[in-house]
Image: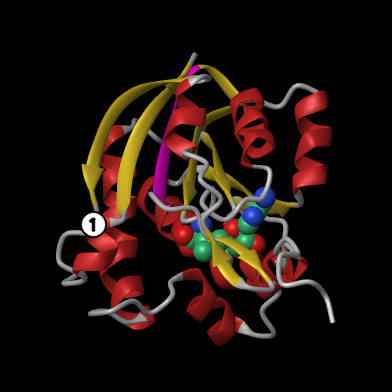
Amino acid sequence: MPPHTANPVYTPGIFESPDMGAAMAIILTPEPGTSTEERWRIETPYLAGEMAGRLDLNANSLVLDYGCGIGRLSKVLIEATGCFVIGVDMAQRMRELAPVYVASPRFMVVSPEGFDALIDRGIKVDFGFASWVLQHCLEVERDIERIHAALGPMARFFMVNNLLRAVPTDRGWVHDGKSVEALLAARFDALDRYPFPPGISAPELTANSALSWWRRK
Ligand SMILES: C[S@@+](CC[C@H](N)C(=O)[O-])C[C@H]1O[C@@H](n2cnc3c(N)ncnc32)[C@H](O)[C@@H]1O
């Protein structure tokens, strides 16, 4: 039997969802006071409105959706602004489901490794966002560097995140003590920060999460 003190083992396979329904449930987990369905219905247009309302996105814009899942936000952002979105996701199944869900020629999806190859060849996006992703990344410093490298000078970055880290492990979601906001602050200037989400009566979720805007240094 392994010793009780053994470190938790990282289990990113939790994001390899067998189908669209399972993917939706892991993307927006039910929380006390709210369900996956309610969060999807209320949160999705709200976040898209925040982004479309604060940025001048149009048919020439190239946007990064980091940890895109099935492309929940890519889809509404494309519909609202006509922009191109490049989704990046580590999970093969999410990368298979996303083009089906978004169903737009303006959407493309790649793995983090593939995105690194594009960055090496000079890709620059006009704006980037990560929704409910960076809390889950094991080596989040690497993900932040990747996002920083992909953004053009002074480009803005929008983050929706849990304040407590939730790294998937064989012992459940683990808070490893890292502050994503503190790590981001080394590479980005903080612009704005406000609580989440209006219209959803889930005090725990609201207390433990934040929306924040950043500008690439
Ligand atoms: C909770 S879901 C959020 C999906 C989407 N951003 C949304 O809000 O609808 C988290 C997603 O991040 C992806 N992910 C987790 N760690 C990642 C990493 N290091 N690099 C890229 N994607 C990652 C997962 O595969 C999953 O699809």
Toward the viewer: 207 or 30? Answer: 207
Picture coordinates of residue 134, whole percent (x, y): 54, 48
Q: Residues within 10 Å of mark 1 (few under 14, many from 20)?
A: few
Toward the viewer: 163 or 102? Answer: 163
Residue 139, can we see it?
yes
User: What range is drawn magenta here?
Assistant: 154-161
Q: Is residue 179 left or right of residue 211?
A: right
Q: Is residue 212 left or right of residue 139?
A: left
- Give the quarter of the figure containing the N terminus: bottom right
Say which amino acid is labelled 1. Answer: Ala
Above or below for 69 versus 137: below
* Image point (22%, 42%), residue name: 194
* Image point (75%, 64%), residue name: 6
Above or below for 192 versus 159: above
Q: Is residue 34 left or right of residue 93?
A: left
Q: Which residue is mark 1?
A: 207
Residue 88, can we see it?
no
Picture coordinates of residue 196, whole percent (x, y): 24, 54
* Image point (82%, 24%), residue name: 121
The majority secondary structure of the magenta stretch comes to: strand
Picture coordinates of residue 122, whole percent (x, y): 75, 21
Picture coordinates of residue 45, whole percent (x, y): 29, 61
Toward the viewer: 135 or 124? Answer: 135
Secondary element at tag 1? helix
* Image point (53%, 75%), residue name: 26
- On the image, which quarter does residue 28 sit in? bottom left
